Image (cartoon, rainbow, N blue to C red):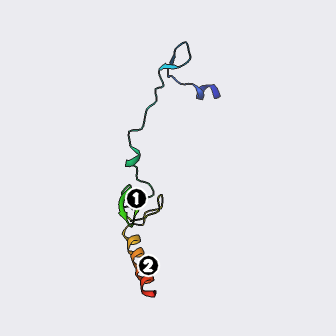
Amino acid sequence: MELLLGQSETQVEYDRAGTIIKGQEVILPKRKHEDVHVNNHTSVWGLWWKDHQWAYKCCQQTIRNTYCTGSAGIEAAEAALDFIMKTY
């Protein structure tokens, strides 16, 4: 049973040195690293700049690889900043 599941019909050609000539070519990904949106972000890192810091444009997070909070996160950050300014 193990031999039946382990077989395939792919053909690979090797040269005398043992390198692959034809059969299992490497397919490179078509997406660039800059086009990948991670952690629910709708923009890429570095599209927003404020106070000498790069951030995501969608949520203005200055810490990279954080989860996107969107407009609610922007409003919460502004409210926290206003609260801090009022206490001083």
Residue 33 shown left or right of residue 16 in the figure = left
Q: Could you say where residue 69 lies in the image, as x and y percent from the top left?
A: 42, 66
Q: Could you say where residue 24 lies in the image, as x and y percent from the top left?
A: 48, 25
Q: Residue at x 35, y 61 (%)?
A: 48
Residue 1 shown left or right of residue 59 in the figure = right
Looking at this view, is 27 or 61 the one in front?
61
Q: Could you say where residue 30 lies in the image, as x and y percent from the top left?
A: 38, 39
Q: How many numbered tags mark residues here? A: 2
State the mark number for residue 1.
none
Q: Could you say where residue 87 lies in the image, as x and y percent from the top left?
A: 46, 87
Residue contact between numbered discs 2 and 1, judged by CB atoms under 8 Å:
no
Whether residue 57 can be seen here:
no
Looking at this view, is 23 or 82 the one in front?
82
Q: Is residue 24 above or below residue 85?
A: above
State the mark number for residue 80.
2
Q: Is residue 45 above or below residue 80?
A: above
Which amino acid lies under the numbered mark 1 shown in the image of this protein? His
Residue that badge 1 annotates:
41
Which quarter of the figure is the N terminus placed in?
A: top right
Q: Quadrant of residue 76?
A: bottom left
Lower position in the chain sequence, tag 2 or tag 1:
1
